[in-house]
Amino acid sequence: ESSPRHNKFNALFGVLAGYESRDDGYYDINFLWFRYLNDREEHVKLNLFPLFYHDRTAIENVYVIPPLLAYSMENNDRFLQLGGLGLVWYRNYNKRKEEETIAVLMGTAWYEVRIKERGYRSIGSFWGVLWEYQTETETDYSKISILKFIYSNTTSKGQSYSRIFGIKL
C-alpha cells in the first residue's frame, strides 16, 4: 500500500516483516521479533527480542534486558531498577517523596534506605542485622550497630553512649 504521504509493506500480515512510514515523521520497521518504531520522537520503541527492549515516551522510559533479567523504568514520579529480577540489584527511588531503597543480593550484601524526613539514611548488611549505620542530618543523630543488639554506639545532640547486649555503658 502506498500513497504520497503513506508507505506500508507487510509480509505474512506483518508477522514475518513490515514497514510503514508517513510524512509526519512516523515510521515502523519490523522483521520477525526485531522492531523499531519512531513516532515523531514522541514515542520510540526498539525491540531486539529476546536480547533487548526499549520503550520511550514523553513521560516514561523503559528498558528490559531478558538475558540479565533486568528491568529499568523511569517516569515523573519514580525510578525503578531490577537486576536478576531484583534478587541481585534493586533500586527504587520515589522522586516526589525523595525516598530511596537500594539492595544488593536481596539486601544481604548491601542495604540502603534514604528518607527525606529528618535527612534519614541507613546502610548495612543483612537488612541492618549484621551491621548498620544510621544518620539523621537534621537532628545530628548517628548510630552504628553490630549484630543489632551485641554492640551499638549512638550519638545524639552531641552526646555519645555505647551499649553492649542492650546494656548502656
Image (cartoon, rainbow, N blue to C red):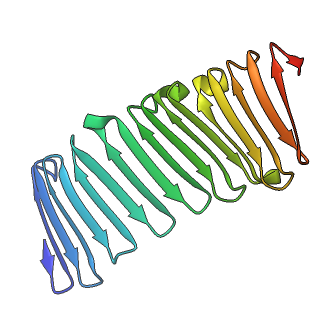
Say which residue appears at 66% left-offset and 31% top-offset: 132
* Count of numbered marks: 0
Q: Is residue 10 left or right of residue 60?
A: left
The residue positioned 14% from the left and 59% from the top of the image is 18
Residue 102 coordinates in the image, percent (x, y) = 55, 40
Which percent across, then down, holds residue 116?
A: 75, 54
Q: Position of residue 17 (x, y in %)?
A: 11, 54
- Quick check: 167 above or below 14? above
**From this viewpoint, which residue is outermost toward the front?**
169
Q: At 72% across and 20% down in the image, what residue appears?
A: 148
Q: Where 160 falls versus 119 (above or below)?
A: above
Q: Check the image and report above or below for 155 versus 149.
A: below
Report the front residue among 135 and 150: 150
Nearer to me, 152 or 80: 152
Q: Is residue 90 above or below residue 125?
A: below
Name the foreground residue: 13 vs 32.
32
Q: Hey, which quadrant is residue 56 in on the image?
A: bottom left
Query: Is residue 118 shown left or right of residue 90?
Result: right
Quadrant of the image for the N terminus? bottom left
Task: State the quadrant of the C terminus.
Answer: top right
Q: Position of residue 87 (x, y in %)?
A: 45, 28
Depth order, front residue of 2/142: 142
